[in-house]
């Protein structure tokens, strides 16, 4: 040991120095960098980092320094009619099968088939409409109304069938 051969006060001073040097060396190995804070200034009621900002002559800022909230927010662009989802041939076949079961008044089979279709395409209004009509025919009006609402939600192009279902369930 470093302090070997020392006695009394010299020994305790040597141990204390050794501990302090060890702590200093270990703190130098610390992995995180020191955090520096950037000073901020108040300009026009908005807290901003300091720096030269160009004067703005726009009426919105009144000659003040521009801040992140001084700019007008643009209106979101909404397409007039969203594009119709492309119909996968497999999904089209499932929908046709479910409608065929409905034509044969096999309501439970049409429900099973439409539910299978929804597992493949969750936003397909046609499957929700088939489910709503099938549950209506089985007399489960609350369930029919839930599916009719979903059909309304996802209907994008020709919604006449969905509208007829909603009207037959006395929903608005």
Image: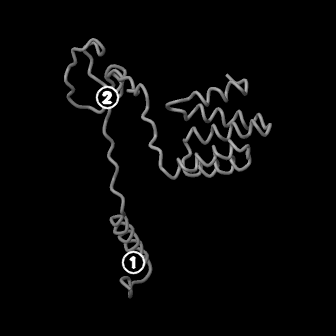
Q: Is residue 151 left or right of residue 59?
A: right
Question: Could you classify mark 2 by the number of other residues whose Cα lies within 10 Å: few (under 14), some (14-19), or many (20 or more)?
Answer: few
For residue 171, above or below residue 39: above
Residue at the far bottom: name it.
Answer: 5
For residue 162, what is the image quadrant? top right
In the rendered view of the protein, which quadrant contains the N terminus?
bottom left
* Element type where label 2 sits in the image: strand
- Which residue is drawn at the image coordinates 38% and 74% (left, top)? 18
Q: Residue at x 58, y 27 (%)?
A: 160
Q: Residue furthest right?
A: 139
Q: Residue most toward the front?
A: 104
What's the distance in space between the residues labelled 1 and 2, CA to CA? 55 Å
Residue labelled with disc 2 = 41
Quadrant into which the C terminus falls: top right
From the viewer's side, name the closer residue of 30 and 144.
Answer: 144
How packed mark 1 is, by other alpha carbons closer than 10 Å (few <14, some 14-19, many 20 or more), is few
Q: Looking at the rendered structure, which numbered label has been put on residue 10?
A: 1
Mark 1 or mark 2: name the one nearer the start of the chain.
1
Question: Residue 53's x, y, as percent?
Answer: 21, 26
* Above or below, 45 relative to 16: above
Residue 83: x %, y % from top left:
42, 34
Q: Secondary structure at mark 1?
A: helix
Between residues 99 and 19, which one lies in front from this camera angle? Answer: 99
Residue 17 appears at what percent x and percent y?
A: 37, 72
Residue 161 position (above or below residue 135) = above
In the foreground, 161 or 123: 161
What number of labels is visible? Answer: 2
The answer to which quarter of the image holds residue 31 is bottom left
Q: Is residue 84 left or right of residue 121?
A: left
Quarter of the view holding residue 147:
top right
Which residue is more in the foreground, 103 or 51? 103
């Amino acid at each position: 040991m470093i302090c070997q051969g020392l006695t009394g006060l010299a020994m305790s001073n040597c141990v204390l120095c050794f501990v302090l040097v060890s702590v200093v060396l270990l703190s130098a190995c610390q992995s995180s960098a020191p955090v520096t804070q950037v000073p901020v200034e108040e300009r026009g009621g908005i807290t901003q980092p300091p720096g030269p900002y160009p004067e703005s002559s726009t009426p919105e800022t009144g000659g003040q320094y521009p801040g992140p909230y001084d700019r007008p927010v643009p209106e979101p662009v909404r397409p007039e009619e969203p594009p119709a989802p492309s119909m996968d041939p497999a999904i089209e076949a499932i929908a046709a099968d479910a409608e065929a079961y409905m034509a044969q008044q096999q309501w439970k089979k049409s429900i099973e088939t439409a539910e299978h279709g929804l597992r493949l395409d969750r936003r397909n209004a046609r499957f929700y409409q088939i489910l709503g009509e099938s549950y209506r025919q089985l007399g489960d009006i609350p369930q029919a109304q839930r599916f009719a609402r979903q059909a309304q939600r996802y209907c994008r192009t020709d919604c006449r069938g969905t509208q007829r279902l909603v009207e037959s369930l006395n929903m608005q």
